[in-house]
């Protein structure tokens, strides 16, 4: 194959994978053309690309699945190659063929390989000839009910009916006994027809405790095929992957080598080129069986990148431009352990149903050699009904599994999303589960342990309410200072020059329909200049001070330091701690400066000198009327009345030095 210089690629995809491909392409000096639908006009992949073209309405069938438009745009934009990412057109042989016919390189395997693996039954026929081990089953042409029933009875139960055109966990039925077979068959066929336009099925023995272990393979156009080790993707819900890891825990070198050579044989059997994945079911007894081959880049490819130090997209581009594989099998090594957790907009407590809406707030862990975040979404973007609701992939690496798992827990703790429900807490609970820590994995892990997750209490603690109060008070003090015409007015300033020591604010939070009234009394600043508050809530008192840095409340509560992330949007306050989120509503009656109504006396919280007394005992004063002028730190501060009242006593005269906390003026009781 001759070398094709690729200078510009079109990415026929969206979201995180489009962004991820653009990053590598740019690193290699390759220009990128994005395509976008209505829903994606302002999305990240459009911003990152060098050029972006509109392809149509939001529904995938009108945009990202429009092969004709994508090819037209590739031609208009002079892109010499198309990267299909995963999903959409990535395994569409017709699209690959049309690219070739139009002189555009399809970054993927030859059309014949896509076709060969497109049907699960055809793939099994090919693999059976290549001596690749298969689960005992039937994958023939004859699809009559009577024949399928008799084949099923021969295989034995439990068994699995699979749509041969299926994918993404759809079109599968587990059948436990012979009597249930026909009903399950009909239902599976109906689903296959409506989802994949084809009702053909295969049946195979259902393994009761298998692991999903898949081999990453790579092939070039010179006939070299290598494997880049395996990934364990056993933790699944509805046959879809939740957390993936590499290498597969406990897999012996011998099994790895065996699986690797079978995967290479499978790739060779179909003249494969580029990146591909051979999926196996790995049984308890150490035997393994070919399940299917995915002829594209997988969602979970980053765990392989983390343990090999390679960039698989870079390899895809090298192979697509006619280059040879950069390394041989012997030159590859596994280093450490990696996990990938898929952060989804979905509700684990509601059968993992996708959630949609605007992401009001998103804070991701700091990236490093240990932590990587692949995402196509930032705060302000929306998760729509049109596409997969994945928000990001969190990938972590460390020297071994337990260190990497600790990284995963830590990074999930720092992953904060507000505006819609996510699975972050669920993933964190999963990462903390003892069976997961012990790598006691199989594809039924979540069936067995799912109900033990999500079990932490979502009650709101006093500590969280205190943090919420601190956040609101500090936020207010900032906006108070900004709004004030008289920047020194102690009534407007809600920190330093609060001249009334007993001034307090009431805040009301509503959480899970329960109201939590809180009172925050101003107290002197601490040594670092952070405003202190005495916070009363739930009949207890807490002395709290702190500051906010990058959406993080750094709070000292009764001498204990805590850090809590937060997002505030109008009257919605969300607190994040340990991968958990609490959404509070700030009640309408909050932040009433209660000094007006209840405070009779005026006190100074910091030392100063009285330089002018503007009122006498018995005077009636009106709001905003100047009462006393003080000087402190070489600045004058006018202290004004804040309500209509009468002066009872003036306790200091001009020239007097005033200590903080001293009462300056007292008022008549109401
Ligand atoms: P899809 O293409 O829809 O992803 P797969 O054939 O890859 O379907 O299977 C998805 C998952 O279903 C596997 O990861 C595994 O958990 C389960 N599965 C598939 N075949 C079997 C089987 N014969 N026995 C037990 N589990 C199976």
Image (cartoon, helix red, strand yellow):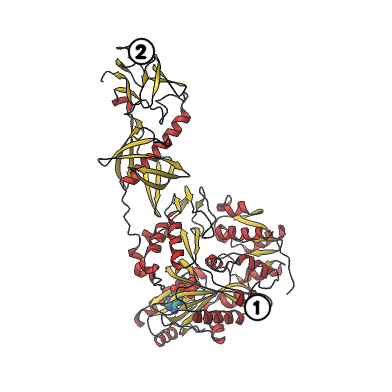
Task: Examine the rendering and report whether any part of residue 37 can be seen.
Answer: no
Q: Is residue 409 toward the left or the right of residue 56 in the image?
A: left
Of residue 609 and residue 300, the one placed in the foreground of this image is: 609
The quadrant holding residue 629 is: top left
Q: Secondary structure at mark 2?
A: loop
Q: Residue at x 33, y 64 (%)?
A: 451
Q: Is residue 332 toward the left or the right of residue 356 in the image?
A: right
- 33 versus 275 height, above or below: above
Of residue 564 and residue 186, the one placed in the foreground of this image is: 564
State the image coordinates of residue 477 (x, y, percent, origin top left). Answer: 42, 33
State the image coordinates of residue 384 (x, y, percent, origin top left). Answer: 50, 54
The residue carrying pointer 1 sits among few (fewer than 14), some (14 to 19) or many (20 or more) residues within 10 Å by Cα, namely some
Q: Residue at x 41, y 30 (%)?
A: 496
- 327 versus 88 height, above or below: below
State the image coordinates of residue 666 (x, y, percent, origin top left). Answer: 29, 19
State the image coordinates of residue 45 (x, y, percent, origin top left). Answer: 59, 55
Question: How many angstroms separate mark 1 from mark 2 (CA)?
Answer: 95 Å
The outermost residue toward the right is: 2
Residue receiving disc 1: 224
Residue receiving disc 2: 615
First along the sequence among labels 1 and 2? 1
The quadrant holding residue 81 is: bottom right
Of residue 494 and residue 206, the one placed in the foreground of this image is: 494
Q: Are marks 1 and 2 in contact (CB under 8 Å)?
A: no
- 28 versus 226 height, above or below: above
Task: Examine the rendering and report whether any part of residue 301 can be seen.
Answer: yes
Instruction: Name the front one of labels 1 and 2.
Output: 2
Q: Secondary structure at mark 1?
A: loop
Quadrant, the C terminus = top left
Of residue 249 and residue 36, the one placed in the foreground of this image is: 249
Q: Is residue 375 toward the left or the right of residue 161 in the image?
A: right
């Amino acid at each position: 194959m001759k070398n094709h210089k690729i200078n510009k690629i079109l990415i026929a995809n969206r979201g995180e994978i489009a962004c991820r491909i653009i990053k590598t392409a740019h690193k290699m000096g390759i220009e990128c053309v994005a395509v976008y639908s209505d829903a994606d006009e302002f999305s990240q992949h459009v911003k990152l690309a060098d050029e972006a073209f509109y392809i149509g309405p939001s529904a995938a069938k009108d945009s990202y699945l429009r092969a004709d438009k994508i090819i037209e745009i590739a031609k208009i934009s002079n892109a010499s190659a198309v990267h299909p990412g995963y999903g959409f057109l990535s395994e569409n042989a017709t699209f690959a063929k049309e690219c070739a016919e139009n002189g555009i390189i399809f970054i993927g395997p030859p059309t014949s390989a896509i076709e060969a693996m497109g049907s699960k039954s055809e793939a099994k026929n090919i693999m059976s000839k290549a001596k690749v081990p298969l689960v005992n089953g039937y994958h023939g042409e004859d699809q009559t009910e009577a024949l399928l029933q008799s084949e099923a009875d021969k295989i034995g139960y439990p068994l699995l009916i699979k749509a041969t055109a299926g994918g993404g966990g759809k079109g599968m039925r587990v059948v436990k006994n012979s009597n249930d077979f026909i009903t399950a068959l009909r239902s599976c066929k109906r689903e296959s027809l409506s989802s994949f336009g084809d009702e053909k099925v295969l049946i195979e023995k259902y393994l009761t405790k298998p692991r999903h272990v898949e081999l990453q393979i790579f092939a070039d156009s010179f006939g070299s095929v290598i494997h880049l080790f395996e990934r364990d993707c056993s933790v699944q819900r509805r046959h879809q992957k939740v957390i993936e890891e590499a290498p597969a825990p406990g897999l012996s070198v011998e099994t790895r080598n065996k699986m690797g050579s079978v995967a290479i044989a499978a790739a060779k059997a179909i003249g494969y080129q580029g990146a591909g994945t051979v999926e196996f079911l790995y049984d308890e007894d150490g035997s393994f069986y070919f399940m299917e081959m995915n002829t594209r880049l997988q969602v979970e490819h980053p765990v392989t990148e983390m343990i090999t130090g390679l960039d698989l997209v870079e390899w895809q581009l090298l192979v697509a431009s006619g280059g040879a594989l950069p390394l041989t099998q012997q030159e590859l090594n596994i280093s450490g352990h990696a996990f990938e957790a898929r952060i989804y907009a979905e509700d684990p407590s509601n059968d993992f149903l996708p959630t949609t809406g605007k992401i009001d707030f998103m804070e991701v862990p700091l990236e490093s050699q240990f932590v990587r975040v692949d995402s196509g979404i930032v705060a302000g973007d929306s998760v729509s009904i049109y596409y997969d609701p994945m928000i990001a992939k969190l990938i972590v690496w460390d020297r071994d599994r337990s260190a990497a798992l600790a990284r995963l827990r830590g990074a999930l703790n720092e992953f904060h999303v507000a505006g819609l429900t996510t699975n972050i807490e669920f993933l964190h609970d999963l990462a903390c589960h003892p069976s997961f820590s012990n790598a006691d994995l199989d594809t039924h892990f979540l069936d067995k342990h799912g109900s033990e997750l999500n079990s932490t209490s979502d009650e709101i603690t006093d500590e969280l309410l205190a943090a919420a109060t601190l956040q609101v008070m500090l936020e207010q003090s900032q906006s108070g200072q900004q709004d004030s015409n008289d920047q020194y007015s102690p009534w407007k300033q809600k920190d330093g020059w609060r001249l009334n020591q007993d001034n307090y604010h009431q805040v009301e939070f509503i959480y899970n329909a329960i109201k939590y009234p809180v009172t925050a009394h101003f107290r002197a600043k601490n040594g670092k200049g952070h405003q202190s508050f005495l916070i009363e809530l739930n009949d207890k008192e807490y002395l709290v001070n702190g500051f906010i840095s990058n959406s993080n409340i750094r709070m000292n509560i009764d001498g204990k330091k805590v850090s809590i992330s937060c997002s505030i949007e109008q009257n919605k306050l969300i607190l994040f701690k340990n991968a958990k989120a609490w959404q509070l509503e700030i009640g309408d009656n909050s932040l009433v400066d209660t000094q007006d109504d209840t405070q009779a006396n005026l006190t100074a919280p910091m030392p100063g000198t009285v330089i002018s007394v503007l009122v006498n005992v018995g005077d009636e004063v009106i709001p905003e009327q100047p009462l006393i002028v003080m000087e402190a730190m070489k600045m004058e501060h006018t202290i004004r009345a804040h309500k209509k009242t009468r002066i009872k006593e003036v306790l200091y005269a001009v020239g007097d030095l005033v200590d903080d906390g001293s009462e300056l003026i007292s008022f008549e009781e109401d």
